[in-house]
Image (cartoon, coloured by chain):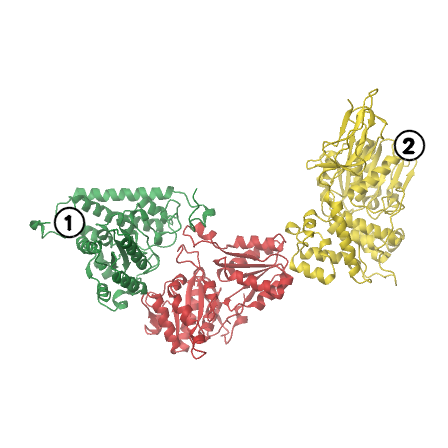
Amino acid sequence: MNAQTHIKEAGSKTREMSYAEAIRDAMAIALERDPTVVLMGEDIGTYGGAFQVTGDLVDRFGKDRVMDTPISELGGAGVAVGAALTGLKPIYEFQFSDFAALAMEQIVNQAAKLRYMLGGEAAVPVVFRMPSGSGTGAAAQHSQSFEAWFGHVPGLKVVQPSTPAEAKGMLLAALEDPDPVIVFEHKLLYKMKGEVPEGYYTTPIGKAAVVRVGKDVTIVASAIMVHRALEAASKLAAEGIEAEVIDLRTVRPLDRETIIASVKKTGKLLCVYEGVRTLGVGAEISALVAESEAFDYLDAPIQRLGGAEAPIPYNPDLERAAVPQSPDIESVARKLAKGEV
Amino acid sequence: MPTEVIMPKVDMDMASGKLAVWHVAEGETVKKGAALFDIETDKAAMEVEAPASGTLHHILAAPGVSVPVGSPVAYIYAEGEAVGPAPAAAAPAAAPAPAPAAVAPVAEARSEAVASTSATKPEAVAAPVVSAPVMAEAANGPRATPVARRLAREDGILLAALSGTGPNGRIQRHDVEAEIARRKAPAVAPAAQPAPSAPAYALDWTPQAGDLHVTTRKGNGVPLVLVHGFAADSAGWMALERALPRDLPLVRIDLPSHGRSPLRRIGGFAELAKALVQTFDRIAEGPVHLLGHSLGGALSLALADIRPRQIKTLSLIAPAGLGPEIDGAALNGIARASTADSLAPWLKRLTARPDGISHDFAKAAMLARIDPALRAAQQELAEVLFPDGVQAFDLTAALERVTAPTLMVWGRDDRILPWKQALAAPGGVALHLMRGVGHVPHMEDPDAVAALIGRHIRA
Amino acid sequence: MARDAQENLPFAIRHFSPEALKEALRKMHLIRLFEEGAEESYMRGLIHGTMHLSIGQEASAVATCMELTDADKITSTHRGHGHCIAKGADVGRMFAEFFGKETGYCHGRGGSMHIADVKTGNLGANGIVGGGLPIAVGAGLTAKRLGRDDVTVCFFGDGANNEGAFHEALNMASIWKLPVIFVCENNKYGMSTAAAYATAVPNISDRAAAYSMPGVTVDGNDFSAVAEALHIAIARARAGEGPSLVENLTYRWRGHSKSDRNRYRTKDEIEDWMSRDPIQRFRAELIAHGVLDEAGAEAVEAAAKDAVAQGIEFAKAGPAPAITDVTKFVHAEAAA
């Protein structure tokens, strides 16, 4: 994947860093550039954050700008919304995206709607960072993928970066955005390394990326699923099946053009997402393709791979079985490409 | 009590059989074990022997009628036995084979489609090979993907006439594209010099009456019957004939719509085999050696299966019917070519050494195919036998059943039928794989092939 | 109880039978050994995910549950192993749950953070800080509406006292005078954040005043002190006088979870608390008052050790859930 193509004002040099480090780098740049930026969250100070994303930022910027909050997601999110409404640019970290359920009132009823309710006279430039996804053995209440929940709310933007370079660029883009943005960070990606441009740049919100070009089947995936789809695609390539892989990157607003153009080329669509399959992100993508001019190019029923209709289980084998894995993607994509679906 | 003659079950999934022909007429005597009638199943024709000696009476099933397995079709009365009243005729098979009935509306629909397209755009006749599930769908419109529907709409193709290769017979993009390619196939051939006004091939041809054309070479001993391949004719054996022993009697049969045989509309492989069997029955004076090439090989195999006692040895050169793969483009190309220039590239595919096909050779070959009606009939036959570039008939089971000593010769560089299909042969078959030889070993290396056949028929 | 001669004895010695006290000691050992066994199993790779250990808080768990019957309910927290054992759970099934086995309390679906045992009145540990508070109030409401005299003990940590749910739950329990005892195990840190930093009042029990209920802070490592505070609160609840808030001051020896690097606490602080081991303290107290002798105490600990060893074997032998059962228990199964 070439992150350079999506970079604005990027430094020419790159440096290898982890996904978590890239997010920290983005926050450090933001704290340096803009005195109104504050970080808020539980244990983001001395502890360094539940996943060590904020790390040592409290030492560099002090407790006034890297603020530990009480374990009060509802209150904490509300404080962030109020601060954003009155002139600060807070980045509020949830320890787990699951805990955002505690704060839905502030996110959904306040942050998302204030600008609209006040007739355009208010802005809530808040960023909610949400570590999400399964694969860590954290079971039902610490492993969910809520992109579709928030993607269902007008007034919010929802992004899901899949690489370190995207994570940095999209967080900076989220801060630049005048409206609330929710950044889903897949927990399994935190340790993933990649080349990240130095300095300030943004990766645009609302733009998907074609990360592998192919002609036989389109796979639209997001977050960790992008990597699983790429793995599946390289196995299929050995059989002569060329899958096109699209990194969705933004759940709301969806990049219709990139998806439709790809489906018109391949005639086959597989949506892969970790959230529960029913009423998930893939349902929306399937629907938009079926409604679009790409319909007349479809040569097989659209397929979706999503999370099981169950809470994320604890047992590791059950946990793996509950979300799409690379062999699942490979199998469905192969059948699609061969006209067996 | 007369002996009941029933429709036997000769195939695992057979519920009824179609009576093809009676070899014994009502009132004639028959010996137990002699050929009594032929039946035709989906897969092959089969000879049924008389279950008793005596006189045949009360024929209940006329040729062409389907009869449920186990039902009586006639009775044999022993010598001196009084002939009783005729029993009631067997009820026709409860579920007649769907194909004939189902094909008719397709053909009608098809002609509409043809009529609706531009008159300047010649249309080949649709292959009536339509699978049953698709036909079942036809009442509510065929199952097809959106892109298949769009392409069919844009090209004026009626989906109901297509056979879907997807799940549940769903018509997919490549099914429609194959149909489009089929219609535009001449464009595939290298730039030819098209005839100024006439279309590249004629659509219309009229079936002709008459028996298949047979020529013979006199000699001593058991004759060798020669059955040529698709788009060839008896003249194609010339090189081999020169290499074979001078005194070996030969019988050459031109297949329907080939050589000097009448043009015939053939509905499937079984019908083609039946035509060959009828001619064979007409001319055979005793057991023969049988040799077939390519499609003629498949037909020879079927003949040996149907008339096992009439065949002393069987020789097959690159026979069809032993696997699905076939170079459909080459078959279509040869069948359609209207000039030596458009024919030559396809002929080159037949041999391992394409430079051996000179322009003069192509011109001579084209001369034999100059009749547009013959070419049209052959195109139609190709569609029937090899729809979508696939061999639509399978003779591997027949090969297992053949009792006559069998020789199989295949060129390792065969680009029409892959030599690996030879591996379908059971252990008793003598298999010869020739290096540096393509699809026509009897033309490419006639001496070697003649030596193999000579040894085989003497053994 | 007109036993003037005994008035100077600790409450627990006066109030409970020697058998009950010995059982309490056994449970405290069982909790300690269970968690040490779980920690070792984790290090051996037998346990997936993480866990929150309550080592150092055993007196709080066991003393709180001393007077509860199986009809009484508890709601627990992410640091809930002690509560679970104190309320009577079987360590074999708890280990089985840790190991992700079908034989575990949650059939391998819950893991450490969701162990429940409804039969013994344990409504379950909860992965959400403050998640159990409204549930406990609901249980109290049920008891009151059905005219039963069972009570609900709601365990929560110091961190949860800053959750909105805490305030909402206490308020509702008070206005409806529900039989709920809110037991705060104040171990000084909500993950890394000090309660003193995160909480506006000096004692969490001070919050009780805002909701018009009695609030008391006791030494959570003193078995007798906790038992006495609970005795009073339970009596009040059973009498229909409403909820109470009890704050047990204690300390977790281990980090918040297995990923804690202990950057927010000093070594001295941890060692100081470890020198005040609630189990040794209770054991010495029992020996001093003649409830048992050294040999007896050793026997109690040995029995707990046996139970843990057997529990681990039981857990290892249990079957894994069938992969095809990934959606099982989402809905009640149709009656056979």
At label 1, counting other C-alpha atoms closer than 10 Å, the crowd grade (few under 14, some 14-19, many 20 or more) is: some
Q: Which mark is residue B256?
A: none
Q: Quadrant of the N terminus of chain B?
A: top right
Kindly indicate which chain is depicted in yellow in the rendered structure: B
Q: Residue at x 81, y 59 (%)?
A: B122
Question: Residue drawn 33% across and 52% down?
Answer: C124
Q: Residues within 10 Å of mark 2 (few under 14, many from 20)?
A: few
- C106 or A196: nearer the viewer: C106
Tell me if I can see residue B412 in this picture: no
Task: Check the image and report above or below for C319 versus B333.
Answer: above
Count the labels in the image.
Answer: 2
| Mark carried by residue B220 | 2
The front one of C214 and A193 is: C214
Q: Chain of mark 2?
A: B
- In this image, A336 relative to C194: left or right? right
- Tell me residue B10's x, y (percent): 72, 33
Amino acid type at circle 1 is His
Task: Provide the secondary structure element on which disc 1 rests.
Answer: helix
Which residue is under mark 1? C15
**Residue B175: quarter of image:** bottom right
